[in-house]
Image (spheres, rainbow, N blue to C red):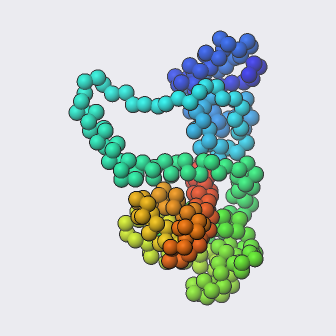
Amino acid sequence: MAGLNIVVAKDTSYESTIKKLSTEVDGLEYTLTSTKSTQELLKLVSQNKIDCTIVDSNIFMINQRYYPEISLSLVLSDRKNLAWILRHGDKSFKASLYKWLNHFERSGNMNELKDFYFSYVGIFDYYDTTIFYKHLKSRLPKYKKTFKKAAKKYEIPWLLLAAQSYQESHWNPNAKSHTGVRGMMMITQATAKQLGVKNRMNPTQSIYGGAKYLRKLEKRLNNKIKGKSRWAFTLAAYNVGMGHIHDAQILARKLNLNPYLWSDIKKVLPLLTQKKYYKKALHGYARGDEPVKYVNAILHYVDIMRKKESE
């Protein structure tokens, strides 16, 4: 670390860490900044404007998909816990806090929140993410207006529709699969006929057809599936079929899990690859791992695109 241009956010735990290190490592020098956030410092590292900074591991993993060039160099401390500090003697506030936390946990909202921020942290792949950034510049602009118009017509978040299309075809209108699916949204011939899509290789027809199909699936879901879980269920059904989603919900109830939360259903779907579970399922065997990876990947792309749109 000696000789590197190290910049750390002032008045943070990272400042304490670097100060301690400077007493142990000869030649270590650093700069403190009160004008740059930790995320801004990571961006500067990705742009080679500074050599390195110090961040928590979870913050690093979340931001790695925005700045795929950054890499982890050194682990500087053991795992540390974060905690809330309450004023001593304020029993009513403490009781209210525990009551809220218990309700938040039991309702499944805690798992849903963790799932939203961290479910796709572990799927980062440098090559895949780098290619995605290239296609954001070279391919998406050709179809962006079409995604927005189709999404508006069928009341779907356009980033979700575009990200799903990328997962399906990498925004390649000529994409083909050995299973017979074709085009930007990789629609089967039977589904295309049902949706009124005459030419699956036509990007506009494919995008509108995929959006229409996505909305049809969403409308078939139980009204108890709400929020972010609702689109996750819809995407999973697009990938593996609504019948297998219903089987997973039935199995979730048997396992005392919430059949209306994606964070629980994603635990159950992979079980449908096991004979002891799928032999009792109405629709039989399912490639249960695939829709989970499918949804995670799409949410990963949505998150990157949302960040790029806000810049």
In the image, farthest residue toward the front: 276
- Residue in the image at 48% along x and 56% along y: 263
Quarter that holds the N terminus = top right
Residue 297, position as x, y percentages in the image: 62, 58
Where residue 44 sits, quadrant-wise, is top right
Residue 237 visible in the snapshot? no
Q: How many marks do you count on the picture? A: 0
Q: Position of residue 201 (x, y in %)?
A: 71, 79
Residue 299 appears in the rendering:
yes
At 26% across and 36% down in the image, what residue appears? 95
In the picture, measured across the screen, residue 90 lies left or right of residue 253, that is: left
Which residue is painted at 44% across and 72% down in the image? 221
Which quadrant holds residue 86? top left
Residue 263 is left or right of residue 131, and the answer is: left
Relative depth, front residue between 37 and 96 = 96
Residue 45 percent across, percent down from the top left: 70, 34
Q: What's the residue at 30%, 25% (across, down)?
A: 87
Rendered view: 188 above or below 158: below
Q: Please state if 84 lies on the left or on the right of 21 as rendered.
A: left
Q: Nearer the viewer, residue 246 or 32?
A: 246
Give the left or right position of residue 102, taking residue 49 as reference.
left
When the figure is inspected, residue 190 is found, relative to residue 42, above or below; the finding is below
Kindly give the residue lying farthest to the left in the view shown.
92
